[in-house]
Amino acid sequence: MHIKSKLPSVGTTIFTIMSALANECKALNLSQGFPNYPSSQRLNDLVTNAMNNGYNQYAPMAGNLDLRFAISNKYQLLYNSTYHPEKEITVTAGATQGIYTIVSAFIRPKDEVIIFKPAYDCYQPAIELNGGKTIAIQLSAPDYKVDWNEVASHISSKTKMIIINSPHNPSGTIWSKNDMLQLQNLTRGTNIIVLSDEVYEHIIFDNEQHQSVCLFEDLKQRSFITASFGKTFHNTGWKVGYCCAPEHLMVEFRKAHQFNVFSVNHPMQKGIADYMQDSGTYLDLNTFFQQKRDLLLSLISESRFKFKPSKGTYFQVLDYSDITDEHDVDFAKRLTKDYQLASIPLSVFNEKDKDDNVLRFCFAKTDETLIKASEILCRI
Ligand SMILES: Cc1ncc(COP(=O)(O)O)c(C=O)c1O
């Protein structure tokens, strides 16, 4: 049988490779983006209660209504922005499914989708599986600033979507209000849909304000927001997230959603809805992760790694150009094998594997793990 792959260049991801190597070498694993401490006992109890109270059959297609109300209240509270719980919010199986479904609901063969590299790894395959063409704009270390004239030069009648991500995985940078205004100006009067990946919205540091697309009225009208409870509530394995968008976009999203997922794990949704009644469960996240970032950075300040403090997400990138000029994939592997510390080389997120000599470390780890990791980093 001859199979012609729809994704010929996709192989085993670097996350799988680095985690496998970390296990093999018994290394500290700061590569993949997940916590190594438990999700809240109260949240676990609320999910258990939901199971015991009968939330075990299909949830409504768009999601448990209590959860959609809780999400809607959050947007009102944080951004003074209204998303109607019944018409403009849909619960998804993690942000990944939300992203895939948004792309598949709107992208037709040959449509162009602009993404910014380094980019989270699920965007491009989603575009290509749907026949779309990725237009990648490469940003440069260490600031990963967008040149809006360059973006303008890529926009044409073929551009159907722009995917953005702030706070940004992997660089830990954030977009400013000016970036959002530039995007709003560039897309005004077009039919371009914006997919705003805001999974790290609650992990932003130094009193910065997250610039959600919903704060910019014209942008909001053409945008989807995707979000992930896995990131917010320290349980990436639950794979529950959501997306919100104005009704005219959400109607189309749901046409695709109901046939590729239909509905998402019901007791988890109900448990999360109850947990979110206390806004502290998501508002305290900035302080929690800022302490972890500061701990790691203070402990490695004397090391040979150079860095700009992460402004958001639970990732810190470290520049190792004062240590070696090895390719970042080789250096990441060597660190894992020789020093028992696993990270992710940034080139894998870049266009044509551009290598800036930087590695990404996840600091969603216990303080004990971060202390051990910093001791290793100081020895290199
Ligand atoms: C930027 C970004 N978007 C989306 C996702 C996927 O989120 P989920 O696990 O909820 O599917 C991740 C997970 O690492 C991410 O970093």
Image: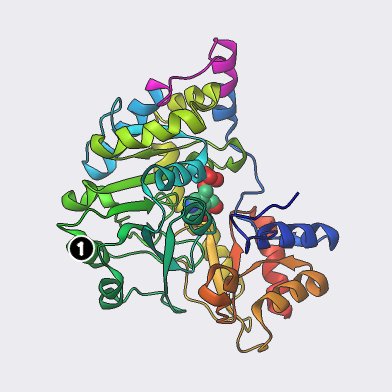
Residue type, mark 1 in image: Leu
Task: Say which quarter of the image contains residue 177.
Answer: bottom left
Vertical arrangement, residue 87 with respect to residue 170, above or below? above
Residue 30 appearing in the image = no
Q: Nearer the viewer, residue 309 or 226?
A: 226
Q: Residue furthest left?
A: 189
Q: Position of residue 358 (x, y in %)?
A: 58, 77
Task: Say which quarter of the image contains residue 349.
Answer: bottom right
Q: Nearer the viewer, residue 159 or 2?
A: 2
Q: Residue at x 66, y 66 (%)?
A: 343
Residue 344 appearing in the image = yes
Residue indicated by mark 1: 181
Which of the image's four quarters has the C terminus?
bottom right
Q: Nearer the viewer, residue 54 or 197?
A: 197
Q: Position of residue 336 (x, y in %)?
A: 77, 69
Vertical arrangement, residue 230 with respect to residue 274, above or below? below
Rendering colour mode: rainbow
Q: Position of residue 235 (x, y in %)?
A: 58, 40
Q: Secondary structure at mark 1?
A: helix
Specify the principal SS of the magenta part: loop
Vertical arrangement, residue 47 with respect to residue 16, above or below? above
Instruction: Report if residue 327 lies within the magenta region.
Output: no
Q: Residue at x 78, y 61 (%)?
A: 22
Q: Position of residue 202 (x, y in %)?
A: 41, 49
Magenta segment boundaries in residue numbering = 47-65
Left or right: 128, with 29 as reference point: left
Instruction: Report if residue 51 lies within the magenta region.
Output: yes
Task: Say which quarter of the image contains residue 20.
Answer: bottom right
Left or right: 377, with 177 as reference point: right
Distance from mark 1 CB to nearest ligand 1 atom below 8 Å: no
Q: Residue at x 14, y 57 (%)?
A: 189
